[in-house]
Image: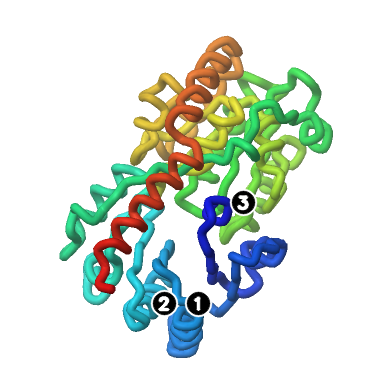
Amino acid sequence: MLLERGHRVSLVCRSGSPLEKRCWSLSDLSFDCRSIDMKMGPGAFFLLYRYLKARCPDIVHTHSSSDSWLGGLAGRFAGIPVVRSRHVSLPVNDFFPNHLLYSYLPERIITSGTAISKTVTQIRGVDPSKVVSVSAGVDLRRFDAALSGDVIRAELKVRPGQPLVGKIGVVRGWKGYDDFLEAIPRILEGAPEARFVIVGDGPGFEQIRSKVRAAGLEDKVALLGYREDVPEIMAALDVQVLASFTGEGTPQVIPQAFAMRTPVVATSIASIPELLGNGERGVLIEPRNPQSLAEGVLKLIGDPDLAVHLAKNAHSFCLRELTVDKMMDATLAVYEAVVSSSPK
């Protein structure tokens, strides 16, 4: 989106990452990619510092802990203002030097939800006026509700009319995959024909695979790992579940599901109740409660009219408030404020 708007973009990412592979597929004279080992250390710092001095960007924008230390310090030493994003609502350990990631290194902090903003403003030394909430936006060209999920349902051998329930995201502990697996037998009691799919990779993937086998659910649950065809997968789903019990800000999979008119069941944590309109755009469930999760899924499976109504509300809200263009407008406004206030 930045390239389409005429901006010059330089991206630094971890060597061997999926992001690096995607970067090499881009051919644009205004785009440059550099891969380095993102582990904090003098070698990585000097590589990034030299890269910044060579590219001379107006802004350094960092996103996670490691790159915020590297990018924040390298940007400071190179005389380039830093913007830091915070995407999760996990508590921040406010001890030296950790709080410098938020109070000293960045000129602005962009959060993906008001709940995260509240957490960040409580960190020692953070100026609340420099914390800006920008909701995640969805690219409606890619996440198009007109897409068909028939190919995915055929791949999974799911018949027309047979309920398909999915969970999409990085596979890690606080994302609630254990709760999802525990809910499946309870869902099957009310909807014996239901099938389930888990999409994504991460540190907990093999553990979840083992638990699926141990529970005897291999014929009910498909684990697809990392996939690029997420819009088509969402189009195939009758219900999309978000079962996280902490950490979330504005999860990207919810706006994406909204755009695809895929009915959503999600835990009532962080900014999710606000995102779901307190139940007007999806079904809210209790975190760490497999029974509540099962009841939420069965509510939508058992009442297709309700599922369509909620998905229609969500789609309208997405078109109005959660587009990637709106997200980019807000992000660029932060960049412009930082650049205009930085010493020349």
Q: Which residue is mark 2?
A: 70
Q: Amino acid at mark 3?
A: Ile
- Earlier residue among tags 1 and 3: 1
Name the element at disc 2: helix
Callout 1: 10 Å neighbours few (<14), some, many (20+)? Answer: few
Q: Nearer the viewer, mark 2 or mark 1?
A: 1
**Which of the two discs, 2 and 3, labels the residue nearer the N terminus?**
2
**Res 260 quadrant in image:** top right
Callout 3 secondary element = helix
Residue 215 placed where, x, y %? 66, 43
How far across and how far down the image is residue 258, in percent? Answer: 53, 30
Observer able to see residue 246: no
- The answer to whether 294 appears left or right of 144 in the picture is left
The residue at 53%/14% (across/down) is: 309
Q: Quadrant of the C terminus?
A: bottom left
Judge left or right: residue 277 versus residue 16. left
Disc 1 designates what residue? Answer: 55
Q: Is residue 249 above or below residue 206?
A: above
The answer to whether residue 161 shows anywhere in this view is yes
Given residues 26 and 265, the one toward you in this image is 26
Q: Label 2 vs label 3: CA separation?
A: 33 Å
Q: Amino acid at mark 2?
A: Leu
Give the SS element for disc 1.
Answer: helix
Which residue is identified by label 3?
208
